[in-house]
Image (cartoon, coloured by chain):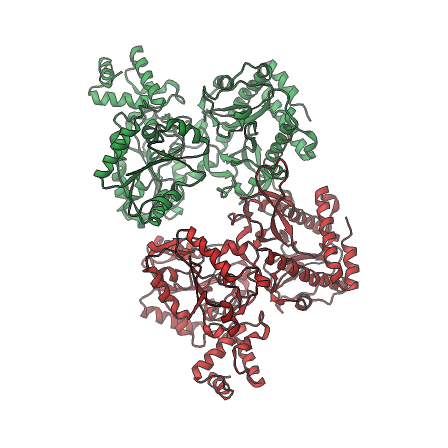
Chain colours: A green, B red
Amino acid sequence: MSQSKLSKLLEDEGLGTSETEISNLVRGVAAAPDGFGRDAWLTLLDPPPSPKLRSELETLKKTFELGFEITVDSLLKISQIRDALRELNLDGIMVPRTDEYQGEYVSARAQRVAWLTGFTGSAGTAIVLKEKALIFVDGRYTLQAREQVDQTLFEIVELAKISVNDWIQQNLSPNTRLGYDPQLHTRSAVQSLAKACSQSNSSIVPIMPHPIDSAWLDQPPPPLSPVMPHNLEFSGQSLKEKCAQCGSQISMAGADAAVLTLTDSICWLLNIRGADVEFTPVSLGFAILHKDSSAELFIDKRKLTGEARRHLGNSVTIREPDQFFGALQELGTSGKKIQVDPLTTSEWVFQSLGNDNCIVEMGDPCIVTKAVKNSVELDGARAAHLRDGVAVTTFLHWMSQNAEHGNISEIDAATRLEDFRSIGENFRGLSFPTISGTGPNGAIVHYRVDPDSNRVLSPEDLYLVDSGAQYLDGTTDVTRTIAVGKPTDEMRDRFTRVLKGHIAIATTRFPVGTNGGQLDSLARLSLWEVGLDFQHGTGHGVGSFLSVHEGPQRISKAQGGALLRPGMIVSNEPGYYKSGSYGIRIENLLTVVSTIPQEGMAGSFLEFETLTLAPIDQTLIVKNMLDDGEKQWVNIYHALVYQKLARLLEPEVRDWLKKVTLPI
Amino acid sequence: MSQSKLSKLLEDEGLGTSETEISNLVRGVAAAPDGFGRDAWLTLLDPPPSPKLRSELETLKKTFELGFEITVDSLLKISQIRDALRELNLDGIMVPRTDEYQGEYVSARAQRVAWLTGFTGSAGTAIVLKEKALIFVDGRYTLQAREQVDQTLFEIVELAKISVNDWIQQNLSPNTRLGYDPQLHTRSAVQSLAKACSQSNSSIVPIMPHPIDSAWLDQPPPPLSPVMPHNLEFSGQSLKEKCAQCGSQISMAGADAAVLTLTDSICWLLNIRGADVEFTPVSLGFAILHKDSSAELFIDKRKLTGEARRHLGNSVTIREPDQFFGALQELGTSGKKIQVDPLTTSEWVFQSLGNDNCIVEMGDPCIVTKAVKNSVELDGARAAHLRDGVAVTTFLHWMSQNAEHGNISEIDAATRLEDFRSIGENFRGLSFPTISGTGPNGAIVHYRVDPDSNRVLSPEDLYLVDSGAQYLDGTTDVTRTIAVGKPTDEMRDRFTRVLKGHIAIATTRFPVGTNGGQLDSLARLSLWEVGLDFQHGTGHGVGSFLSVHEGPQRISKAQGGALLRPGMIVSNEPGYYKSGSYGIRIENLLTVVSTIPQEGMAGSFLEFETLTLAPIDQTLIVKNMLDDGEKQWVNIYHALVYQKLARLLEPEVRDWLKKVTLPI
């Protein structure tokens, strides 16, 4: 349906006065994904739309959910971009797949790489030069890129072979003026890019808006989803308290104010949620927090319902996004010290502040406080995990009854699991796309099933399902691996080694002052012993009805991450992948708790409490590979799973759970 | 003896023509510590000195070895420095205890902190401001600083409470112009200092020479010790090959030349050794290595004997130290790219290069290659460890016969151990000051015995001895803890936990691509289990007749260090310290070796070979706390120690070793 036709329909329904105004509103609403608020997006339209308009809007929404209508004519697009470069006196342009918020999920508007190249994977960077264009993708996307991208126009470069900056350093012609949009790159990324360019005697040039935004006529607008207050019963701390706490941290850092650009920080701080992107219930916007605890929120006011305005109250000043630049300029010349995080904040923010002398380069002041969950959030997480455990256990029972018969596909399984979850109280959607992989697909770490890859589960398979949900009271993430039929000895050996790694993390005690990087090898030792390993981190932080991947803590080979503190939630997910055959992963979420002081202890220690409640497939465990402590952990964990879930399960499921959690 | 009197004596002996020339030579020779070359320093004097002159020189040398003649009149000195600051239009000056080479040990000339404050500890920083002066020291030196420093003039600040830069950030008056000598701070240190100053609206100002150098009339000259070729039978690779190898790394990094300022890198690269500082057999100097493998060595030519000149040959151009600045300036304007390491190279080098655009900031190109020992160096290390094992085992036997009788002090023990070592072939001195601590002194991690602290070993003690030697074929470092009499149950429990940590490191297998930081926690798990830990790293790299503390690899909580590679040598030294009671540490050196590929292994794996050969006190082991694998390790290790050392030991010692290495 054409835009003008839609506008006409809207005007007929009394949904606004100016055509542009209406059409912008409706397109913005349509650009927000479905999900967290369910039909909440419709509440932004007043009066509510007729069934006819609603159906039209849903069609438009569907279009945006697919990213946008991809009509790839890369040849035309590249020549448009090259024309623009010539006018701008540039020799090339960076095309990143990031937006101005640097979050994990981006809106359709930010899909510049896809618009240009046709490549729709979730990570990738393109560079358009005068004589050449390239797209850099990582290992999981090499095949997809080859299918989607016209290789006569774009050279596909594998990131495993060379990084973008190394490529630039080694291949850029001298004196290249390489453009980049400072809104789409963090300061630290720009510094690395500048260094790579200078090594090839070239330079980077900021250019805004991105040339693609000018060439892309039907670029989706920024998404408009309603801002929803996140109530005290879930957040456990008022926005005033949070602003005061983070304000005093700004003060302690020697700054007067902090610029916040991470949307999950802002939503956490102000106790609001939104549905502007998929899987992470955030509203896109920027904020400035002052040391006196006053805050400014730069957000499209059309997203604010009356309830949201009342919730934000007087301590938060609402300003339009286009006022953000002026506010930064004013801050930069105020003589105040401004805290900004170079790792997560766009170069544009730094440039807008104007004056590097006013900048205190430091992490976002919300990050650590957000990661340390308060008791209400932890109780919420435990409650959410009960519901999630019921859903996952019910699913595993259903699988035990049906998987072997050869008529369940990976998509069937994922759908069924989502169905079981969606009936849970406070359920608001998935926290990431379910990884549902059987046999060889299970060995693909970031596997996302689609109709082409979809396999039917067969009795010789291991089936791996990694999934999670967003509940108002908590975010979940759990992986179980089950034997569809009778597993081989090798599968059982590998599963038991992965389990030993999982138990080593779950049971370790460690001193205050330890980071996750120091614990990572415990999850791998048993695999290393026989010359095996897994090629991903052991654990990531998890938000509270926020991002399922949250910093600053993690358990990983790569650097250490932040110190582990009581109240932090982190995943414990060692795995093993035999390419072309099967994948194994066992994932529970843990929370860090203080060790009860005992005589003789020198200093304060920490340990983990497991939050996730779902049985581990005992048919895959080789008992005599476990030592006494490990067997005890399995038995205590299974007793806990049964004790917590039994009364919440259907009788049939409960009986099954009783059986599969018997002590080994 | 006065300088002119000494000069007269020298002239009488025909040791030169100009008085200044002679006196400078002799003072420089005297400023080099004794040690690696033994009396080699005398070879720089031609003709050899008469007994009378030699005795005078030894007296002068002794003076310099004490640092210098400390006649602390801090009040006068501070006022001199403040006068100088006024003239220089500065408000303050940094006084670091580092020299222009940033090595672990510095010559007497660099003891500016001691000259100014009287504090002679091995680490500390002073700041002189207009109204205030401070000295920053770490926990091990707080008491010593209070004794040595006039606290009416200097505030003593504990580094555990606040870092130097944090102090500056929080306390410096606005608009302070803080001077620093760019030769004495690395680039990265200067950047941190500049940031701290800018946070307090102040600025740093480079000033050379350091105002103390002008005020310090009897400042010792740079040390002059003879440069000794390090022969191929020990180095295993010619300097030409090394220059070619590192030159090609410079080329791969996109640079044309590298500036080398780490003396152990330079000595390794050119296969030379010296005795300019204590414990590390280096000659102080700078070098530039070009990608075509030609090298320039900036060194005081008086240190070069004919043999050294022949060894360096045509591929190394010898230039005087005062030509270094001009060479850097020339490089900086040559259009070439210059590789410099901001973490280890002085700011002065960067400033002398003039132009940051020419700089490729990267680690010293020798560091990794130096750390990966070749087969000749590894054979040398094994041979040195045989000799060292004989000395340590002979010492431990001697202790077993004598320690309990209550007439052996910590100094006696250290002296005896040095005596046993000094008779070994290729012995050239200690690799660091022996830590010989009994009872509560053993609990002080960096304990260095002096006549005041010296304790007599008593039967309720644990005695800890951490020591090492420099042999022409290798550098050693070993710690053993022994029960002087009958140990308590607690001591045995703790010792066994430390041993379990030691064994966990010694036996682990890990994939290529692993760094030491990933293994560190394995050394601690058994202590963590009962709420204990140790407050130092688990392991450091070790040089080959070079620094006993060598990068870039380490096993440590703090960051990861470089990837472990076959041929690297690293220490394995977990410990446990009960303050006021006892200390335990078990340290062996390990070398990284490739795991022999076996079927089913995915990828290449590494493991450790233990180099150190000395018995571990079995009376301190609680057998039933070890699992089967751990007992097996103890028995195999002890069998190896006996097998390797037996034929080299005195019969009495051999019989004793047989007994104390019986299987448990």
Q: Judge left or right: residue A162 versus residue B523.
A: left
Query: How far across and down, in percent of the image, does residue A95 sit?
Result: 33, 35
**Residue placed furthest toward the left:** A18
Question: Quadrant where the N terminus of chain A lies?
Answer: top left
The answer to whether residue A534 is left or right of residue A292 is right
Give the x, y percent position of residue B90. Answer: 33, 65
State which quarter of the image contains the C terminus of chain A: top right
Residue B530 sits above or below residue A57 on the image: below
Left or right side of B230 for A179: left
The location of residue B623, given as percent across then percent down, is: 75, 46
Identity of the residue furthest to the bottom in this view = B12
Res. A192 visible in picture: no
**Quick check: can you spot residue B240?**
yes
| Res B65 quadrant in image | bottom right
Tally the numbered discs. 0
Nearer to me, A355 or A163: A163
Q: Percent from the top left, x then y, of residue B384?
A: 64, 61
Left or right placement of residue A561 versus residue A313 in this view: right
Q: Residue at x 37, y 67 (%)?
A: B208
**Above or below, A503 relative to B492:** above
Residue B52 versus residue B125 in the image, above or below: below
